């Protein structure tokens, strides 16, 4: 096992097989504890086997169904195909800083992302350490955060996104699909800082798409505060940049890190399969 950064974000694990007994074999409680400690786990050479992948995802909890269904890997309702190959699955992952499932009142807890085909250049996924970001803030700012809430007007934002996606023909959605998607979205607030109930460690929770402003602050103050939080979290010295190789499986804890995808250069294929694990209230 090798650390991915000098400051404790991320761990690479070689030779792991969820069903095997190789030198990298680890039990489920150990893997879960490592994820909690390091925020991101990088398994190299994971088998290209959707059943094994799906079984492994259950180690972390209950997989969420993929919506819309046309983005599913055929035969795997919980596995999302993400590729820049036109006409297959979903586009690449979000190209803005986010935690997965932030649009839900109970966000996704863990994300698994398996790389089927990696581009030769770029196409990385970036991870920002949100626990370290909290500690790196100036004292006065950090001390002002507990109790502050972010606004997540998700229903309004999703309605606008769907209009745009349908217009750009990046997805086809029937009226019923749209209604179903909007039906489970709400406008809500969420603390800017979350505390892990087991460890007491605190982390920032931000999202460049769904988080609009800070409750009770004038626009300029809200923008200034969020700007400082994003700048601290996403400073290159607080970010792990993952260059993909086919067979990589990344598992991350959405409460400890936020991430963003870098697109692959034109003409180079990037294909991944994603499973997300439902959060618990
Ligand atoms: Fe994502």
Image: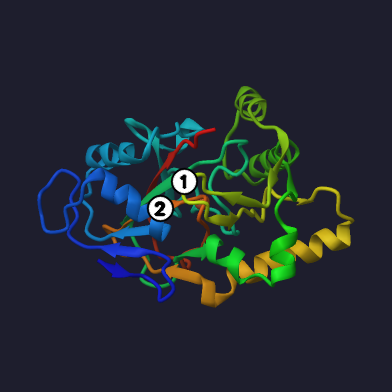
Picture quadrant where residue 172 is located: top right
Give the side of residue 156 with respect to residue 241, left or right: right
Relative vertical location of residue 208 with respect to residue 232 in this rendering, above or below: above
Q: Residues within 10 Å of mark 2 (few under 14, many from 20)?
A: some
Q: Sequence order check: which comes first, mark 2 or mark 1?
A: 2
Residue 85 percent across, percent down from the top left: 43, 53
Q: Which of marks 2 and 1 is in front?
A: 1
- Residue occupying the point 52% across, 51% down: 200
- In the displayed image of the protein, which residue is found farthest to the top? 176
- Residue occupying the point 34% across, 51% down: 33
- Residue occupying the point 73% across, 49% down: 147
- Residue occupying the point 89% across, 56% down: 218
Residue underneath mark 1: 198
Q: Mark yes or no: residue 114 visible.
A: no
Mark 2 and 1 residues: CB-CB less than 8 Å, in contact?
Answer: yes
Q: In which quarter of the image is the N terminus?
A: bottom left
Residue underneath mark 2: 36
Give the side of residue 135 with respect to residue 56, left or right: right
Question: 240 or 75, which lies in front?
Answer: 240
């Amino acid at each position: 096992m090798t650390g991915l950064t000098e400051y404790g974000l991320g761990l690479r694990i070689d030779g792991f097989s969820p069903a095997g007994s190789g030198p990298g074999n680890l039990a489920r409680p150990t893997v879960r504890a490592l994820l909690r400690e390091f925020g991101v786990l990088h398994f190299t050479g994971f088998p290209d086997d959707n059943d094994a992948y799906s079984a492994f995802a259950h180690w972390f909890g209950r997989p969420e169904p993929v919506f819309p269904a046309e983005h599913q890997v055929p035969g795997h309702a919980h596995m999302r195909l993400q590729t820049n190959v036109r006409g297959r699955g979903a586009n690449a992952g979000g190209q803005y800083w986010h935690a997965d499932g932030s649009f839900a009142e109970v966000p996704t807890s863990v994300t698994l992302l398996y790389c089927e085909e990696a581009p030769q250049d770029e196409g990385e996924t970036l991870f920002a350490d949100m626990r370290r970001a909290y500690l790196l803030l100036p004292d006065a700012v950090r001390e002002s955060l507990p109790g502050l809430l972010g606004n997540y007007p998700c229903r309004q934002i999703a309605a606008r996104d769907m209009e745009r996606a349908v217009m750009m023909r990046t997805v086809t959605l029937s009226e019923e699909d749209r209604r179903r998607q909007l039906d489970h979205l709400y406008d809500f607030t969420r603390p800017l800082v979350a505390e892990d109930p087991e460890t007491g460690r605190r982390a920032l929770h931000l999202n460049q798409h769904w988080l609009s402003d800070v409750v009770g602050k004038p626009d300029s103050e809200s923008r200034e505060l969020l700007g400082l939080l994003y700048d601290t979290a996403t400073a290159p010295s607080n970010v792990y940049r993952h260059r993909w190789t086919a067979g990589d499986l990344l598992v991350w804890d959405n409460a400890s890190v936020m991430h963003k995808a870098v697109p692959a250069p034109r003409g180079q294929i990037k294909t991944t399969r994603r499973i997300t694990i439902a959060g618990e209230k």
